[in-house]
Image (cartoon, rainbow, N blue to C red):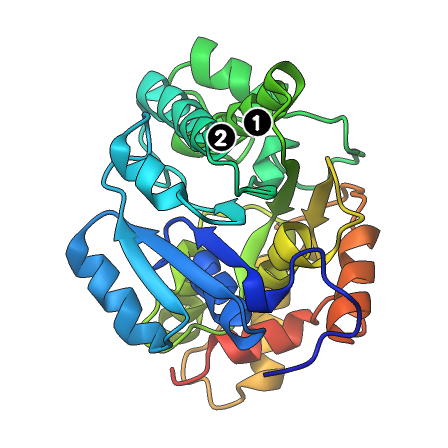
Amino acid sequence: MPSLPHKPALDPTSTTILVTGASGHIASHIVNEALQLGYRVRGTARTKEKCDNTTKIYDNSNYSAVVVSDFSKPSPEIDEAVKGVDSVMMVASDTTFSEDAKSVIEGVVHGVEAFLRAAAKEGSVKRFTLTSSSSAVLVPRPNVEMSVDANTWDDEAVEGAWKRKGEAIGPNPYPFVVYAASKTEGERAMWRFMREEKPGFVCNAVLPNTNFGRVLRGGSSGATGGMLVDLFREGRRAFLPPQYYVDVIDDARLHLCAAVLDGSLENERIFAFAGPFNWNDAVDAIGRVRPDCKVKLEKDPDEGRDLSKVPNQLGAELLRKWFGQDGYKSFDQCVKENLEGV
């Protein structure tokens, strides 16, 4: 078990963390990193079969799993999942990319509120961390300069989801617009709850951009991790426009900084944005780290760049402070680890 360089907000020897959606790409790394630090983790999944699968994957006596079959409304399952835990990490969300804006957005908002209310009733909870998204602050557009900060919200996506049904925003298809609106409104619901209800715990949000990097054995690669595999194997580019990336382990570690490690983090929006990338960068990175690629990868001279400016310095500082890293992991290293075993 690695030793921590500073006294954590919540001590591993006496802390249980709830991680929702424990079989997901980001959540699986959160669980793995937390277990390595000696924390007890209770994961949730939608079915008993998925719960059993996570128990096999983590194979650790400090890990247990419970079923929460529906995240979109209060339930005894949610109350039971939260019972006795010290920190709640709400990672799971609606990633169906459905065009049903009402169902997706309201389901995410009600789910966030359900876990917050359950946590507020459970006196043991000291910290609550929400996995928000880069899309809660902006919809990326190539070659368009924009700046965001902790007070920026993706109102464009919210308006687009409700008022321009079926329409894309720039290169972003309507299902992504609905997803972005759900993440925006879900995070807003958390901060609104904190202002109005004033529960006895600390809240933070982590806003990751595109996650690349290592896939745990038996775990999910997530939608974005699979995109690099498709590019490597078939030369197929994903629909994602130029934007920022983050390594999934860096992302998981920033979640743990917010949830259990850094007591100075209160009411923070932590931007997990390592650096901008486009698919031409991915082609170049594959050429450097996987020269054995058998597919001729083409570049798009008109692809453009993400020119947005984001306050990502806090994330880099936290990775240095708690994990001894030199800031965020490089794009080449993310690509290399993402393609391990492929």
Q: Is residue 220 visible?
A: no
Q: CA distance from mark 1 to mark 2?
A: 7 Å
Tell me the element at label 2. Answer: helix
Residue at point 67%, 48% (across, down): 304
Residue at the left extreme, as displayed: 49
Question: Residue 101, relative to residue 68: is it above or below?
Answer: above
Tell me the element at label 1. Answer: helix
> Looking at the picture, how far across and down is residue 342, in whole percent?
38, 82
Question: Residue 123, relative to residue 244: is it above or below?
Answer: above
In-image side of 31 versus 308 (left or right): left
Residue identifier under label 1: 190
Which amino acid does the dot numbered 1 rest on? Met
> Looking at the picture, how far across and down is residue 211, in whole percent?
54, 58
C-beta proximity under 8 Å, tags 1 and 2? yes
Q: Nearer the viewer, residue 292 or 1?
A: 1
> Looking at the picture, how far across and down is residue 22, in whole percent?
37, 57
Question: Residue 78, relative to residue 234: is it above or below?
Answer: above
Which amino acid does the dot numbered 2 rest on? Leu
Residue identifier under label 2: 116
